[in-house]
Amino acid sequence: MRKKQPILWGILLGCLLLLSACGYYFPHVYEGPQRTIYMPTWKNRSNKLNLDMKIYQSLSRWFQKAQSVDLTKERVGANYALSGEILSIDLPSVSWNTVSDATLTKVKLYVRYSLKDLKTGKILWDVPRKLYTADYTVQLATSAADDEALAKIIEDMSENIYLGTLRILRKQPSATSATPAH
């Protein structure tokens, strides 16, 4: 067993070197220049109270993963603005099987969001209308199940926005971050 350990460590080290040498990167990590993103609370046009705050908190948790990106509620000193709006929410709609029995309910959340460079005023990313959905079985059709499905939607949406924002930040020249907008 002792003789196999150095071989296993060598194979592991070789795999890690291969991954780092082939240009692979982790999409959840941003190691570029320091950036500050102004993100106000989203406009909530739905009748679901505190949905805007849940989205803000979820996005904040995702952006804490990027050490070189700060999320702020202050526009002054920020490089970018990430704004959004909750357009509508449908709680729930029902799916039917071939014999007209209800099988699944579906929570639907429509949102819009955009990322703007505050220095140039240019919109870097604009999603005018995006639908996020989550299903659950009729046996679980309660307000708690609605909330659980909505929490899944918010988490998935936040991850998509986080990864999309990092993808765009990687493409931006570092001169953008050198002079914050006022």
Image: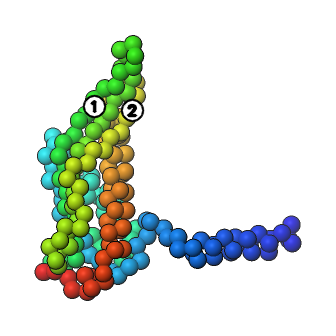
The amino acid sitting under disc 1 is: Pro
**Pointer 1 local density, CA inside 10 Å: few below 14, some 14–19, many at least 20:** many
Tell me where residue 172 appears, x and y as whole percent: 30, 76
Q: Secondary structure at mark 2?
A: strand
Can you say which quadrant of the picture contains the N terminus? bottom right
Residue pointed to by mark 1 = 92
Q: Is residue 51 above or below residue 119?
A: above
Q: Is residue 71 left or right of residue 16?
A: left
93 lies above or below 41: above
Picture quadrant where residue 141 is located:
top left
Would residue 81 be visible to someone looking at this image?
no
Separation of residues labelled 2 and 1 (CA atoms): 10 Å
- Circle number at residue 136: 2
Front residue of this view, candidates 53 and 91? 91
Q: Toward the viewer: 64 or 121? A: 121
Looking at the picture, which amino acid does disc 2 mark?
Tyr
| Residue displayed at 39% across by 23% down | 103
Q: Residue at x 37, y 27 (%)?
A: 104
Which of the two discs, 2 and 1, labels the residue nearer the N terminus? Answer: 1
Disc 2: CA contacts within 10 A as few (<14), some (14-19) or many (>=20): some
- Where is residue 11? Give x, y as percent: 73, 71
Q: Could you tell me which secondary element the residue under label 1 belongs to?
A: strand
Pick the quarter of the image with the C terminus: bottom left
- For residue 116, side relative to residue 3 (left or right): left
Residue at position x 35%, y 68% in the image: 166
The reply to whether callout 2 and callout 1 are in contact (CB within 8 Å) is yes
At a point 33% along the width and 52% down the height, the residue shown is: 157
